[in-house]
Amino acid sequence: MSPRIDRLESKVKSKEFKLKALLDVTQAINNNFEISQLLELYEQVLKTDLGIEKLALYEKQGKAWKSILQFGIDLELIDLSDTDFSGIKNTPTLKISTSNLKESFDIGIPIYHQEQPIAHLLVGDLGEESIGVSPVIKHMSFIQTITNIILVAIRNRKFAEENIIQERVRKELELAAEMQAILVPSELPKNNVFEVAAVYMPHQQVGGDYYDFMHLNEDEFMFCMADVSGKGVSAAFLMSNFQAYLRAIFTYLKIPLQDVIRELNTRVMRSAMGEKYITFFIGTYNTKTRDLNYINCGHNPPVFALPSGQTSLLGLGSVGLGMFDEIPNIMQGYIKVPEGACIVCYTDGLVELENENLEEYGVERLQRLIIEHLNDDMDLLNSFIMADVNRFKGSMPYIDDTALLSCRFF
């Protein structure tokens, strides 16, 4: 057989091999192969079929370049930076070596997609075919093509997985937001006995703050405010469980307020497994005796304002719920509430908000504002407070959930 025919047959076999390899890769992509399976197929083509003995494939992930495939190398390759690949431009480059790489490679091949570098293929120990041309040099165009196809497929799969995760998170957020909307009372009482108003501003789509108001019997009602450590979906779900526990306790158990706190602490420990805790203020008020009993479990102390303009902070209580298996000591506060007095409960997202000078809004500023608007209705008082908070923070963003519950006693 003549040399010319041998060359033609060799070219035909080479094209058949390349077409088959590209077909196998395309089918694998269409069959939604895992990333590890795609890389196994890619390694087979380059290592087994082409005879490449040493290879490292680096993919751009964020700001770093990470090795996603290597063979023929004893050391585990570390992450690299753009500087390490500064010697590789738009075309294959000979003799690649950096101090960070700790390996030398004969050829560096940049892989581009939409005019942006997405990978670098480093090849070494190429060996020689009988005609003296390395397989990488001989099949350079094919290697670039199949590498580009594999890398783009991997990127598309990652994008698809990220979209699925984002969609799942979005649906979880929607569900959590719906749950949270159910948590807080849709209507608060305004009558000749008391007037209640509230504001709630989650920092994200959902938050970990919670307030509630509940009639216990004809003469008594309960009001509370709570704040879960952390934010987002997990905080919202823990708070929804907490609200269910709280209402169930008052509906079915009929136990003293200190025992309510102990029971809630047990429930929070069971749900959060010590990973989160809840600060909590709760008060019960008897409309006939005008007795207010309260316990503050590590929460920001509410402001109690008298018609005379005097204020005090309701801080008596215990540590936060879920901090210890058993709360070591619980103290209960008691107040005789005069006509016209009011209580303003809030979370730390309000008083710890900072302005451009990194100064906190603070409890003292809140107390002064409450005294100034002591005779206004509770909705108006809350509006004045939130407007003052917005003026104070200026261009600074809200950094936490913010809740406000104000109650006047007639």
Image (tube, rainbow, N blue to C red):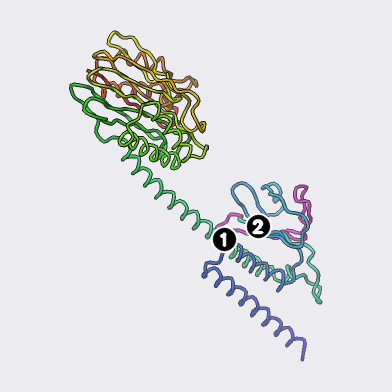
Question: Residue 45, how many percent across, how many down?
Answer: 67, 71
Q: Is 103 one of the magenta-colored residues?
A: yes
Binning the other alpha carbons within 10 Å of mark 2 as few (below 14), some (14 to 19) or many (20 upward) gives: some
Question: Residue 17, how many percent across, how many down?
Answer: 65, 78
Counting the numbered discs, the total is 2
Say which residue appears at 31% left-offset and 40% top-offset: 182
| Secondary structure at numbered mark 2 | strand
Is residue 182 left or right of 73 when viewed as pictured? left
Mark 2 and mark 1 lie on one chain; the one further toward the N terminus is: 2
- Using the image as rendered, state which of residue 184 and residue 98 is in the foreground: 184
Q: Point out the image quarter for the N terminus.
A: bottom right
Q: Point out the image quarter for the C terminus.
A: top left
Question: In the image, which residues are magenta?
Answer: 91-117
Q: Is 388 one of the magenta-colored residues?
A: no
Label number found at residue 154: 1
Binning the other alpha carbons within 10 Å of mark 1 as few (below 14), some (14 to 19) or many (20 upward) gives: many
Label number found at residue 43: none
Q: Quadrant of residue 188?
A: top left
Say which residue appears at 29% left-offset and 22% top-offset: 285
Q: Residue furthest top?
A: 308
Label number found at residue 68: 2
Is residue 118 left or right of 52 when viewed as pictured? left
- Using the image as rendered, state which of residue 197 and residue 2 is in the foreground: 197
Q: Amino acid at mark 1?
A: Ile
Determine whether label 2 and label 1 are within 8 Å by CB: yes
Question: Residue 247, how many percent across, how many down?
Answer: 33, 36
| Secondary structure at numbered mark 1 | helix
Q: Report the predominant secondary structure element of the magenta stretch.
A: strand
- Using the image as rendered, state which of residue 141 and residue 216 is in the foreground: 216
Q: Amino acid at mark 2?
A: Ile
